Image (cartoon, coloured by chain):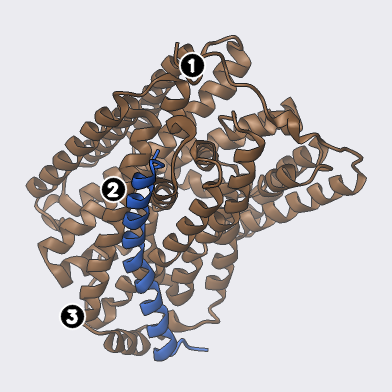
Amino acid sequence: MTLGMAPFAALIYFALAIVIAAPAVLIWMWLRDRRKGELW
Amino acid sequence: MNAVNDAILDPLIGWFILAAFSALWIFLGWFWGRRSEGLDDYVLAGRRVGLALGTATAMATWVTSNTTMAAPQLALQMGAWGMLGYSLGAVGLLLFAPLAGRIRRLMPHGYTSGDFVRLRYGRTAWRIFLVISLCYSLGWLVSMGMAGGVLINALTGIPYHYGMTVILVICVGYTLLGGFRAVIGTDFIQALLILVGLVVIAVLAIGTVGIGPIHSAVLERRPELLNLLLPAGIMFLFNNLLFGIGEIFHSNVWWSRAFSFRPGVGAKAYTLAGLFWAPIPIVAGFVALAVPALDLNIPAADMVGPMVAATVLGTTGAVLVLIMVFSALSSSLDSLLAATSILVVEDIYRRHLRPEASAAQLRRVTAIVIVGLGVLTWLLCAPRIATLAELLYFTGAFVASTIWPVAAGLFLKRAGAAGAIAGMLLGSAAGIASYFIIGFYVAALVGAAVSMSCVLCGLLVSRLEFDWQALGEAEPRGAEAGA
């Protein structure tokens, strides 16, 4: 049972989308925590 | 390892990058640590870490050099299941999320996973647990120290002992100066560096070659890598899953974070960390699958990631990989130093030798232990005995045997010491036996299964009704104010 092109591409693009979004989400959360005085 | 002229980067560039980031981490360690007061500030960042820093530190600590370098290697050896199997390491973080919230609620003044086992199951179970945990921690420290020397040498040609020494000295330095705040703060920056570096390399690999040609080249030249029924891949998948869960459930690296988070943050932070971590081995592994399409000759399997990056991006790609690897190593080493030092101080020094020690004394001893751990790690890494690094894989059976005692102990009042002790001892024994008789890929699986059976049997015969209030132990005097 071979992983075809469509599911292979879907897996890679999905993983890449999360890895691209992650730094943005982290920075957004950091700014929000800093505004609320809840950074550390 | 590779000679200087086989390295991807010029050693001078390597030294410059190492020096620049080392200076940055040391400065930040001093900057964040200069107002630290009291034991709780030093070892748990004041128990007030918020969601952003909490998520980043959990994610970055779990990204080790293995995630960035071994994941591509596994993709090239085991294909799709290698990438997906490695990615299941995120399940440990996700499953720890409810535990993290519960730990913070039940033990608002706790310091270590050892504290929990001592209060929950008694001194015998505690001592067995400590042996497992300290052996694992030392194995992980040594594997990271050795990886640092090996990878810096492979990437830049800088000799193994220099690279290994630099990384250990820098991590000990900023952890000593800044305590847990330095660990958490640098982890946030290191998390961003790892993610951004990986995105750049992967996007450019897709842009240069294309996903279609990458898939076609693998299908033509290495079709077994896309075979979803590869037996070795499936066995690796389950063993890796349980090894990861065992590592996270028992290790004080994760418990210390749970203790350091603000109330209500732990579950969310670990959930997000797991979601952000899961795709990293997939993307890193994908980079390796570009090898057939790029027609690269890979002399050493663990160099596949840097070589693809260098092919796609030239010197810039190699620099990115060095920064990513340095960040991954630092984010794990600093956490290990901090968590293992407080485990030694709290569970050995305080609970066995000096029960009346004040918070100020404990803080001083923690600093000494951080340096001591660094020296011990250096001494064990210096001879460069490969089997020491493999010790980490050997601990799979031991750490997996702690999964059920920890989970049952946190949630089920009837879980008693007998089940926990039997689970850890028999689970470890069975796991080690299967390691030698069958293979490394079943050790954690067998260890977890036998441990689960012991804990379940213990639950069936137990009449215990544990009082959760017993976990709310007081702090040492002066822990918050600093004496």
- The chain whose colour is brown is B
Q: Which numbered disc covers residue B208?
A: 3
Q: Residues within 10 Å of mark 1 (few under 14, many from 20)?
A: many
Task: Out of B313 and B46, give the one closest to the viewer.
Answer: B46
Q: Which residue lies at the image location 62% right of the left edge and 52% below the top edge?
A: B98
Instruction: Identify the residue under disc 2.
Output: B189
| Chain ID of residue with mark 1 | B
Helix, strand or loop status at disc 3: helix
| Foreground label between 1 and 3 | 1
The number of numbered badges drawn on the structure is 3
Q: Which residue lies at the image location 35% right of the left edge and 70% below the top edge?
A: B283
Q: Colour of chain A?
A: blue
Q: Residues within 10 Å of mark 2 (few under 14, many from 20)?
A: some
Mark earlier in primary sequence (2, 3): 2
Pointer 1 and pointer 3: residues touching (CB < 8 Å)?
no
Question: Hey, what amino acid is under mark 3?
Answer: Thr
| Disc 1 to disc 3, C-alpha distance | 55 Å
| Foreground label between 2 and 3 | 2
Instruction: Identify the residue under disc 1.
Output: B362
